[in-house]
Image (tube, rainbow, N blue to C red):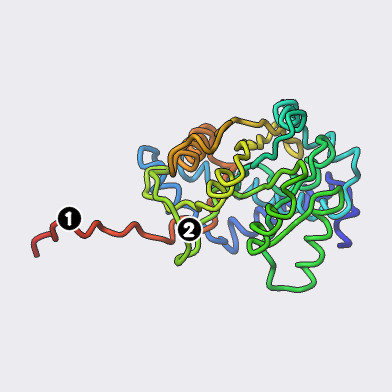
Amino acid sequence: MPLSVLPLGVLYGLSSCMYFVIFHVVRYRRRVVVENLKKSFPEKSDSEIEAIARKFFAHLCDLIFESIKGCAISEAEIRRRHRYTNIELLNAYYDKGKRVTILGAHYGNWEWVALSLPLVTKFQTYGIFQTLTNPFMDRTVKKSRQRHGMKLISTKEVARTLRDTQAKKTTMGYIGDQSPSRHGRHHWVRFLNQDTAASTGYEHFAKEYDAPVLYLNIVKTQRGYYEGTFLTVADEPRKTRDGEIIECFMSTLEQIIRKQPEYWLWSHRRWKLQKPVAAHQPRPNV
């Protein structure tokens, strides 16, 4: 990708131009973003919602160009820009011979994790990759994310990959706040003031293989620089009740979003699924 060879300073100049266009001219998904923010933070004023939306779109533009830079960024630069504060927590499981479940979220810069994580751990790292509709972009993005050793697989390959690598020390990464498919299994939680359907796959596999669950929280410390911190969700998954891992992760993520909401992906339609009304509940009078 030609733009990827440009310095990040130049790309951030382009990002600022893009922000002006998509926020003020095109008004890309502004209605979706504002609606999501208002439902999540009913206590905030219109001016506060507007301020968060502005910061979000500025960050989103940065994220787009950071993803482009990922196609050519050097190992030394990604190490400097995407650091880990407590990688020893993850690596301790390697020393114990454990496999690990890593949960991520659409927060901070999740794109650079594929480039940075394999550089700081002995684990063979796996991540789930959603196939893109454009074949060229699909090949380009997948090649970029696997440059430093991360192995990307589709959702259909997760069960087989976990089965085939039982004798190896691996991590399996999931985007935990992804909206589940309408017909797939999901668990309902209260998240950001709304009933929210959560995927159950990562909890199912964590319990099946008793793979400790960590959430990798990515915080933007300044433009172009991020810090990842591992937070323990479940050290012994098989001892948890059904839904407990999901609820713990979603609760942790909500607390993080509330502190700095501009770094979450507000432009996606996270609440497409509506919680069904219990059959035993009386119908309202007409």
Label 2: few (<14), some or many (≥20) within 10 Å?
Answer: few
User: What residue is shown at x 68% (from left), y 47% (from top)?
Assistant: 172
Residue 135: image location, x then y, percent:
76, 73
Cβ atoms at labels 1 and 2 below 8 Å apart: no
Q: Which residue is mark 1?
A: 281
Residue 239 lies, with reference to residue 273, above or below; the image says above
Residue 268: image location, x then y, percent:
54, 57
User: Which amino acid type corresponds to the residue marked 2 in the rendered image?
Assistant: Val
Residue 77 lies, with reference to residue 89, above or below; the image says below
User: What residue is shown at x 75% (from left), y 26% (from top)?
Assistant: 88
Of the numbered discs in the image, which one, if any, rests on residue 238? none
Residue 85: image location, x then y, percent:
72, 26
Please name whichever residue, 72 or 135, is drawn nearer the observer in this view of the structure: 135
Q: Secondary structure at mark 1?
A: loop
Q: Secondary structure at mark 2?
A: helix
* Alpha carbons under labels 1 and 2: distance apart: 31 Å
Displayed quadrant of residue 283? bottom left
Where does the C terminus fall, quadrant-wise?
Answer: bottom left
Tell me which label, 1 or 2, sits earlier in the chain: 2
Q: Which residue is mark 2?
A: 32
Residue 273: image location, x then y, percent:
41, 60
User: What residue is shown at x 69% (from left), y 66% (from top)?
Assistant: 131
Where does the N terminus fall, quadrant-wise?
Answer: bottom right
